[in-house]
Amino acid sequence: MDIHFAEQLLENATSVAIFGYGSLLWKPDFTYERREIGHIKGFVRRFYQGNITHRGTSETPGRCATLVKSNGGSVWGVAFNVEGKDEVRRAMCGLNLREMTLGGYILMTVTFYPRDGSPPRPVLVYTATEHNSLYLGSDSIPVEDIAKDIVAARGFAGSNVEYVTKMADFVREHIPEDDDEHLFSLDKYVRNHSRNILQSHNSSSNYERNVYHEAVTSR
């Protein structure tokens, strides 16, 4: 779906379900009627989308989560149900700006499978493709190198470290059945790199202290 469809959707819809698998897990920033934990099929979560606004800059891009197609894969997250035309408009306007205009994502519909076993249903989800200019993805890049990019990046919404560690903490606490090796390996490397940066500088900068604090205290 392109941005024109997204604009049409927010003009007409009175109810939407939005699937979050990244920062929406712990920071939705919109009003919703209820939320449900569950998963979608045919994808895996990867930190392959570059970010030069919220979690990075053009000089030091951050890395945000996106969906990568994978046969047999699944991604756990939260479906947020937004009710009422005004609330739908507010939610979609904010998300379309953040995810599509600034973030390089597209909007699509996928099937959501609730954890409680209730019937599957369609949800909206934002994802990035390899054809956008911010895409940094490749399975050949070691997770440790991705972690180094994340530790170095900060945008106007905060550090890229916070983005990763809070996501991992949410999944551990609220979705214990999710064994996302990529996320948890990245989380481990990010925390270790943050700790090493502080320890290697006897007189570290405020930025380094803040990054370390976010990494080791967000558990």
Image (tube, grey):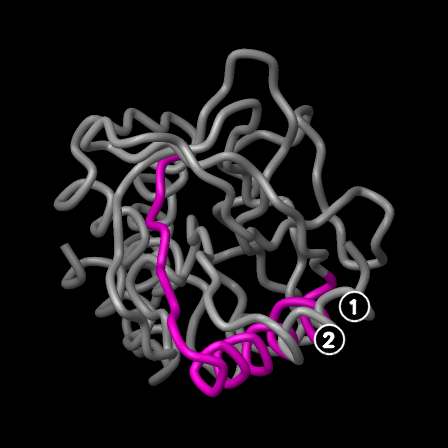
User: Looking at numbered disc 2 in the image, what kind of residue is underneath it?
Assistant: Glu
Position in image of residue 103 (x %, y %): 67, 67
Nearer the observer, 47 or 213: 47
Rendered position, 102 above or below 145:
below
- Residue at x 23%, y 26% (from the top left corner): 117
Q: Which residues are magenta?
A: 76-104
Using a 10 Å C-alpha cutoff, classify the residue at mark 1 as few (fewer than 14 neighbours), some (14 to 19) or many (20 or more): some
- Residue at x 48%, y 46% (from the top left corner): 147
- Residue at x 39%, y 37% (from the top left corner): 183
The mark found on residue 7 in the picture is 2
Q: Is residue 32 left or right of residue 153?
A: left
Q: Is residue 131 left or right of residue 41?
A: right
Rendered position, 177 above or below 67:
above
Rendered image quadrant of residue 110:
top right
Nearer the observer, 123 or 73: 123
User: Looking at numbered disc 1 in the image, what kind of residue is underneath it?
Assistant: Ile
Position in image of residue 203 (x %, y %): 30, 78
Task: Answer whether residue 82 is magenta in the image.
Answer: yes
Position in image of residue 32 (x %, y %): 31, 71
**Mark 1 sits on what residue?**
3
Task: Answer whether residue 86 is magenta in the image.
Answer: yes
Using a 10 Å C-alpha cutoff, classify the residue at mark 2 as few (fewer than 14 neighbours), some (14 to 19) or many (20 or more): some
Q: Is residue 216 left or right of residue 202?
A: left
- Mark 2–mark 1 contact, CB under 8 Å? yes
Q: Is residue 56 left or right of residue 32?
A: right
Report how far apart the C-alphas of labels 2 and 1 lie in the structure.
6 Å
Q: Quadrant of the N terminus?
A: bottom right
